[in-house]
Structures are given as structure tokens and as C-alpha cells.
Image (cartoon, rainbow, N blue to C red):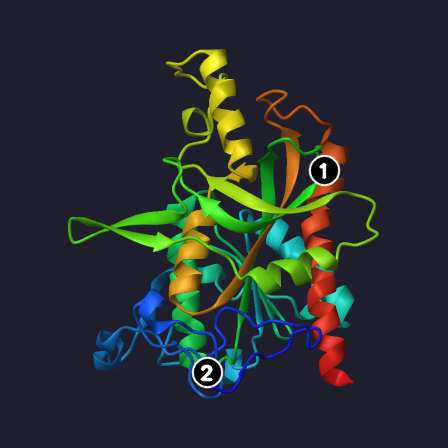
Amino acid sequence: MQCNCDHLVSARAGHYFNCISVWDEKEMGFPCPKNADGSLRLRNAHLKQLDCDVLYHLGLDTSTDLRAMFEDVKFVCMGGTKHRMREFAIHMCRVLGVEETKLLNLTKHAHRYAMYKVGPVLSISHGIGIPSMSVVLQEVLKLLHYAGSRDPVFFRIGTSGGLGVPPGSVVVSAWGLSGTLEKSYDVPVLGKIRKLPSFFDERLCQEVAAAASGDGYSTYIGGTMAADDYYRGQARLDGPLCDYTEAEKMAFLRTLSELGVRNIEMEATAFAGYTREAGVRAADVCVTLLDRLQGDQVTSSKSTMMGWQMRPIELVGRYIAEHCRSQQA
């Protein structure tokens, strides 16, 4: 089949994973979930039976004209805190030349998350951990489906604990690893475990990492462990409960490093699993606040960490701006 990649920054060699010409229906288990125009074709026939679909946690529903509001969305950028995602939205206003005075929290009355729209960019908070993140991620997938958004690209930007990389480094995730050392997100469905492979789009990762060239810090493409717990789940010794030795902790962290894991956070497997199943390209871009091989506690100054936390914001913002300039050329 003919390639239908929408070249984001240039016609580089290779295809995105959701290009119809390389989609492996046998491997994936279903046809490419993209319509001919690039809009999302969600695999849930039950949605068509709803007179009105309430996106409860976003404070939106299909009785409003979602197409008029969100059809032009090309990029969805998610991160943990409301403050960080407002900062990202402000940064994108400056990058894209949009007035900050028009910045409104579109989900404010839902009292759950924060969502800002800056031109073709949605900036959305998702809380901490997979349960909170997966709720808003799935509702945003439905939102863009109803809006008819074409070939949307998702980013997660945040902080993490590094593994064998200097603090302040940026890691672009190639894949997510669960706490049981599997490259999948395990979601219980009707009493049984479904395993969603947790791989990110290889070409998108390479493009994002290339955009960091010359920034004065190290950028890595590698694996990311997504833990379900901040303390024991990440092999820390400083939690309220601990039932393993320091030697056991270090052996586990070295195992992760040998597997190619470069950082540890709490969302990557589900973020990769759900976006991949939906046929949507995604990248997880996180700065490291410490090297877990050297300790457990984050001890850098607030000002230093604030500077580090701008690195994923600026990197993803530069990538989006490059795409927007290429569209205007």
C-alpha cells in the first residue's frame, strides 16, 4: 500500500509505525485504526449507540461542537502537574506567537485536570501514576476522534529518576518496562489480564532526540521503567516500608541498566500501550533529577531542578515549532 506518513519535520527515511504501508495487521491483531484522512477510527462499536458521549473528567460532551473546537489539534502534550502544563502552554504561546491572554483552562469546571489550547497544541495535566494518566488519555483519544483531528501526535513531558545517566539529562523513551520487567502494560479486563505492548514510535523518538542537538545537556534514547509505586516499586530504601537490602536494591537497578533502562517514572507503559493500540504516535520525554545508582533522594536545589524541568518543555516545543514552520513554508 502507498505510504500515508504525514512527514512532521522532513521526509526522512523510514515510516512511522502507524503508516498504512507498514501496518502489520497480523501482529497488531486489527486493521490500521486510521481513516483515509488521518482521523482516528476508534475500535469501539458501542460508541455509535450513544446519543451523547459525556467525557466526564474533561467536562465536555458530544452535544457541543467538538469539531469546531478541536479539529485543528495536531499535538497533545501531557504532564503530571497543572502548573507544569500551564508553563508549557505559556511557552507554546511565545513559540507560536499566540496571545497569553487567550489562555483558558478548558476543563476547569470538571475539577480534575487542566487543559489549555494553543493553536494546534493541547497542553493537559494528567496527575501522577498510570490510573490518573490513563483516564484523561483515553478521554482525549475520544475527544480527538469526535473532533476529526487528523494524525495527532502525543507527547508526555515530565521528570524521572535517571539510571546511569547524569542528573539533568533528557531521556526519550523507546519502550516502557513494567515492574515485572515486561515490555507491556497489564490491564485487567473482565477478570483477565490483557497485555498491551509498550513500544513508542521509533522514528518519532529519533526526530525528537535530534531536535536536542547542541542544547548543552545529554539526550538519550532508551528504555523507561514505569513503576506502580514511588518507593518499593522503584527499589527505594527511604520509604515508610522496606523489606529488602541495599545489595538487593543495587542488583535490581543494575539489572534494569543492563536491559537498557535509562530512567524510571510512573506512566510510560500505559502511555505507550494505549497510544499504540489506538494507532497514535507518541513519545515520552523526561528529564532526570538524579542518578538512582547514586542514591534515592532528590537533593538538587529548587532553582536547579526548575531549570532542568524546562528542558523537555523546550525540546518538545522546538519540535512542534519546526513542524509548524514547515507547514507554513
Asked whether 155 or 121 is in front, the reply is 155
* Label 1: element kind: loop
Q: Nearer the viewer, residue 3 or 131?
A: 3
Q: Are marks 2 and 1 in contact (CB under 8 Å)?
A: no
Residue 127 visible within the image: no
What amino acid is found at the position of numbered circle 1 in the picture?
Gly
Total labels drawn: 2
Q: Tell me, yes or no, if residue 218 can be seen here.
A: yes
Q: Is residue 233 left or right of residue 263?
A: left
Question: Where residue 244 sits in the image (x, y, percent)?
Answer: 40, 14
Q: Nearer the viewer, residue 27 or 136?
A: 27
Q: CA distance from mark 2 to mark 1?
A: 38 Å
Mark 1 neighbour class, 10 Å CA radius: few under 14, some 14 to 19, many 20 or more: many
Q: Would you name the residue on which mark 2 appears?
A: 148
**Residue type, numbered disc 2:** Gly
What residue appears at the point 68 percent right and 51 percent down from the top-left corner?
312
What x and y, as percent, mark residue 134? 39, 54
| Vertical position of residue 160 compared to residue 144: above or below | above
Residue plotted at (71% across, 82% down)? 327
Where does label 1 land, which residue? 168
Question: Which image quarter is the C terminus in?
Answer: bottom right
Answer with the quarter of the image where residue 291 lies. Answer: top right
Q: Residues within 10 Å of mark 2 (few under 14, many from 20)?
A: many
Name which quarter of the figure residue 90 lies in.
bottom right
